[in-house]
Image: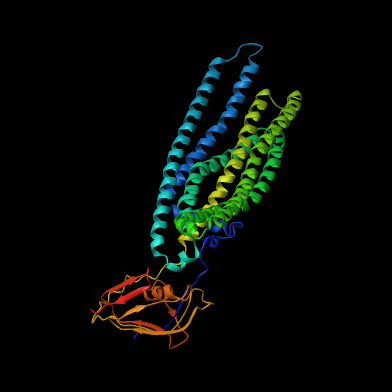
Amino acid sequence: MAEKIQMTARHDGPGVGAVGTGEKSKDLKKAYRNFFRYLGKFKWSFYLAAFLSVAGAVLNLIGPNKLSEVTNLITAGLGSRIDLSQIVRIAALLAFLYALGYGFNCIQGLIMATISQRITQNMRRDISVKIDRLPLKYFDAVSTGDVLSRVTNDVDTVGQSMNQSFSTLVSSLALLLGSTVMMLMTNWLMALTGIFAALLGFAVMMLVIARSQTYYARQQAELGIINGHVEETIGGHNVVKAYNGEEKEKASFHEQNDRLYICAWKSQFLSGLMMPLMIFVGNLAYVAVCIVGAVLAMNGSITFGTIVAFMLYIHLFTQPLQNLSQAAGSVQSMAAACERVFEFLDEPEMADESGKTKRIENVRGDISFEHVVFGYDPERTIIHDFSDEVMAGQKIAIVGPTGAGKTTMVNLLMRFYELCKSSRSSSRVYQTPILNVSAVFESMRFAMNKP
């Protein structure tokens, strides 16, 4: 006889409500760790793309210093003779450096496009494999539309953010740090003036990012909910029409659509505030540097070429802040999408039974339910003490009102729910080896045939 068991399974209730409340992402650091671990064999290509992005940013940082030399040569030659040969050499060097930086950026763009598409391809493949390994109780708790949303919307969000934002973040950080160092080396007073004005806007930007993260996470969750509702409504359109449920379904859809609109509007509004804010701060930094530079030039502390170099350095300093503000929204969407994708991939799977190689002998078809206790939710049992026997060759009809447990009996027989150890020694489901089992679910009848 089989081991005595109590059959329990978690059931949070069907429908789209199980997607989540749409609150702020639970653990962004874990999502990012999972993502970088998922890079796997692509990590060295990712590092190469990051290196090329940094190299391109460094080459751009050389330009202002060389343009300062050109400006000083022109200024010095206004009263006598301008050294055109020296200016041509500097200009040729600048053209070569800028062309090399452009080439680096093109190569890293190609690498990131390849990596992002490979990652999304692997994610979809892993999700497809994961679906086949999940127990039936997972699909009782999560709607089909939400699973589809993770395969399509969330995976696409990850790929687009990788391709558009990561290289921007790396190059922007390199430009930000490099321009800061170059400004401090050139003139610390003008550097502090420009940095203070720019960081004022950066601080405000960080506050906006922290506020908008909540709405980006809610947007992804609400998108999964509305996808689930549309998929279920269209799939069961005949049922909706038959029971005159059109108005109820439309009201439910409008409610979910309004929630998605509010979350998307707030996230996009807060994200849209950052670019105008950073443009204003950048212009403010230009004005501050020009005023301080003019005072220092009148005192003879700096040359006119230094002011020109600082104007370019301020541009290289504020531009990364603007790029960071643009990329912040995309990265936040990616974090929320990553969390949903890896949450799905980390779901408990069915037990691996590939090692069971025992062959069936003396096949019959008898089934015995003995004092079965079962609940979709471990804390709420719906079958308290069920016993029955079906002998080989018998035909049994399972009848009863909705919710009586007809489908549950067949699900237990087919082992759609895993068995758990029982605290009751008399509770068990026993089935002798079966040669042929046919189940007619439409009429809730099944037949056990003799071998």
Going by the image, does 361 lie left or right of 374? Answer: left
Count of labels shown? 0
- Residue 269, given in percent of the width and then of the height, sits at 64, 43
Quadrant for the N terminus, please: bottom left
In the image shown, does 336 or 381 lie closer to the viewer?
A: 381
- Is residue 385 rendered to the left or right of residue 293? left
Q: Is residue 331 visible?
A: yes
Is residue 99 or residue 189 the one in the foreground? Answer: 99
- Provide residue 405's location: percent of width, then percent of height: 45, 76
Answer yes or no: is residue 341 visible: no
Q: Indicate the quadrant where residue 18 lies.
A: bottom right
Q: Please, which residue is most extreme toward the bottom here?
A: 426
**As drawn, which residue projects farthest toward the top?**
80
Residue at 65% from the left image edge and 17% from the top image edge? 76
Q: Locate residue 436 relative to residue 214 in the image: left or right.
A: left
Q: Position of residue 437 (x, y in %)?
A: 29, 74
The quarter of the displayed image where residue 367 is located = bottom left
Is 274 situated left or right of 47 in this image?
Answer: right
Residue 307 lies, with reference to residue 259, above or below; the image says above
Residue drawn at x 71%, y 39% is 196
Look at the picture and state if 251 lies above or below 174.
Answer: below
Q: Quadrant of the C terminus?
A: bottom left
